[in-house]
Image (tube, grey):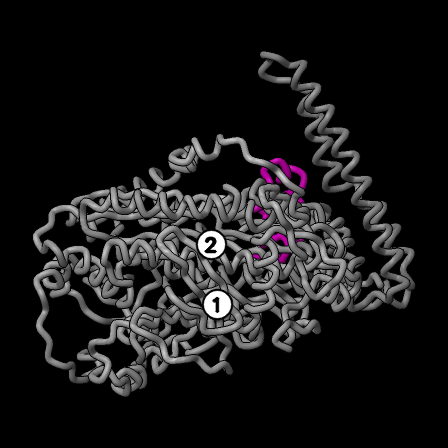
Amino acid sequence: IEWANGDLPDFDENDATKRAKELFNWEAAKIGTLRLLFDRVNLSKDQTQKHYLPISAIDDFDPTIPYPIPNPPAAIAEFKQQLLKLPLKQNWHNLSFLSIVLEKYGACLSFGVPDANQECDTALADLARITGAVAAALASDTEAQQLSLIAGHLSGIQDFIYTISSDGALKSLRARSFYLELVTEEVVQQLLAELKLPRTSIIYTGGGKFYILAHDRVAEQVKAKCQEINRWLRTEFQGKIFLASSTQSFATEKVATSAFIEVWESAIEAANQQKTLKFADQIDDILQRKSSYAPCKVCRRDDQRKLQPLNRREPDSVQACSTCARMFRLGGQIMDVHQIVRSRDRWLSPKRLRLKLDSGTIYYSFFSKDDSIPALTNQETSLLVNNWNCKDYEKSRTTLLLLGNYGARGSELEQDGKKGFMRANEFAQNAEGIKRVGYLRMDVDRLGQIFAKGLKNDYSLPKLAGLSRQMSYFFKVYLNSLAKNRETNFISQAKKYSFRYLTGKPRQRLMFIYAGGDDLFVSGSWNEVVEFAFDVYQAFRAYTGSHPDITLSGGISIETDKFPLYQAASEAGEAEDQAKGNGRDSLGLFGTAFKWENWLGQKIKFDDLDSTANPHLSGNKLPELCGVWDFVVNLRGQLSKDHAQSFVRNLLATAQLQEQHIKNKEEQIRDRKKQLLDHKEDLALKALEHDREEIRYYLHLPKIAYTLARLPSELRDREDFKLIRSSLLSPYNAPYFRAIATWIELLNRD
């Protein structure tokens, strides 16, 4: 506010705050434009371009993605005027209000000691928040030489979310993901209450993980509280979910130095080691012989005496355990959750959830925007979902909750008379071409290395918090906006960031089953899921400054609406693994995996090709159309359905012939290598490898020429089709035939 030439109320800083500010050298810190923190990452490929965050407050709802810009933002007068209009004096002692102001307006400004170029990559929001966390940890002993970092991770999330199969599975899966977000939130709330810490002590929470900064000598308290929570988790989830945690003591001065990364890594490693000993303190109880009963038809657990209908509104509904039945009901209540109230003694809404912990029952009540909310007591907390409207935080004990929660509205009515999430059969029926559902899984490549090694010697706790916040914002906030408002967040930015898209239409028939700290699982109409995957990749690359070390890999499975969801998730996971095995930065789709640039046909260069291909292609010129994307765009627009069927059939036959011949050569190469034993060279082996590459790049030419010759002359001889014809005959495009043919076939299939 002083930076904006405003007046601050008078206040006295306590000794803990003074020491925290000294640790982070606030005296030398300056507010300015914010250099993109991702630019500083360097694993194997240094970032050669500079990027800056545009100066703009986060929108109240559905925030626009703040893509970085190549030059420092200039005009900030209007931004300062926004700050001066805030009712800070009236809310000076309201931590909820100050926290949201800091997050909304401080995420785009830098605050720290500038480098030699007078630039800074530490956000005001991150440094101020972490300084507050350190001050809270020092409050009981301002001269403390040791602090503690608490790390926690809910393990088994995938087992809990994915291993279900039943009618209404999509809704149940979305509810399970939402439920685990609340469980993570509850664990954090319990620890903060136990340690008497404010919410500003949270460094990061999301994706089933959390980090809390605390005073020293809290290990036993944390251990006891986590054991209590694990007793509840084992009963509630039959041992599928486990809270792994650790408490790492460290020298106070390390919070502001690069040495803090060692503390961070040690805390994570210690928590990971706990996973191998999960529920060790409950081993006697686990080993006690217990009766088994009819298994739940959804999750297969068999420890509940009495099952109940999954969907009480359907007389022939499958029988389910209490947890699965609760998840199904919850799935119908979270369509438009705007606010969640946490209480220890009452429900405030018919849309609700109860957690029966050892320390007492916790009640969560859900409200949409239009619902009236009763007055809250001082013991109740209000969680506002993806809401940065400062006015809503003028009541104390209100906090922001980030949720990747986009979901298309279907035709089925829930118990409140409102339409709920779109179901799998609706996704299939609304798909273009073949009536199928798509499932997308995606995550950031080498995220652990980015955090552990990416910043080299430039680490500090505020920067680690900044990396975590920016990753979490993309997957929990900006993906919602990308799904809901494609025109604003993608189409309108296409020219500026060279985005590519098949159609410029909204593609909102999607459901976020899970979107966490660095990964996602999305379902929807198959063609829209495929388009969304390419939108996400391109938006993420722009969001991170197109850094060569920060990439995504993903996998997509395409299934009928009756296909078991857990199996669809598994197949999408296998496609993602195939992408990871392709050197990362890839997409697995249609039974194959290529680099994203090969799918998109962007920036393909001779140097990018496999080294074994160079001798076979060095004399050839890159075609004007290269990769998968341009062929799908052009062919689907120029081929009639009749012509498309025969063309696709021949293209697939060509791909299959080529793949079979390559497979035969691979087997011959393996046999030859076994025969070589210790021999260093073998001319026959080299000849086989040469033949394999000749097949890969040239076997298709006669077949493709024949396929093109069978097209009608009025199409074949058109000027705009000549480009397609010459590019198809290029050896560079030989690996893409199956993907091109499959994509066109699915789009044209009735």
The quadrant in which residue 640 appears is: bottom right
Q: Is residue 525 left or right of residue 581?
A: right
The quadrant in which residue 7 appears is: bottom left
Residue at point 63% right, 68% down?
Answer: 421
Which quadrant is the C terminus positioned in? bottom right
Residue at point 57% right, 76% down?
Answer: 487
Q: CA distance from mark 1 to mark 2?
A: 12 Å
Q: Amino acid at mark 1?
A: Tyr
Would you say residue 88 is visible in this rendering?
A: yes
Indicate the position of residue 175 as horizontal and vertical percent values.
56, 60
Residue at point 48% right, 55% down?
Answer: 180
Indicate the position of residue 494 as horizontal and vertical percent values.
55, 71
Residue holding disc 1: 478
Number of residues whose C-alpha sits closer than 10 Å to that of mark 1, classed few (under 14), some (14–19) or many (20 or more) = many
Q: Amino acid at mark 2?
A: Asp
Residue at the limit of the structure toward the top, as seen here = 678
Q: Is residue 94 left or right of residue 46?
A: left
Q: Earlier in the sequence, mark 1 or mark 2?
A: 1
Number of residues whose C-alpha sits closer than 10 Å to that of mark 2, classed few (under 14), some (14–19) or many (20 or more) = many
Residue holding disc 2: 518
Would you say residue 69 is visible in this rendering?
A: no
Q: Nearer the viewer, residue 441 or 624?
A: 441
Residue at point 9% right, 66% down?
Answer: 14
First to last magenta residue range: 596-622
Q: Nearer the viewer, residue 44 or 461?
A: 461
The quadrant in which residue 689 appears is: top right
Q: Is residue 486 magenta?
A: no
Find numbered disc 1 in the image and state the secondary structure of the residue it sits on. Answer: helix
Which quadrant is the N terminus positioned in? bottom left
Indicate the position of residue 459 as horizontal and vertical percent values.
27, 50
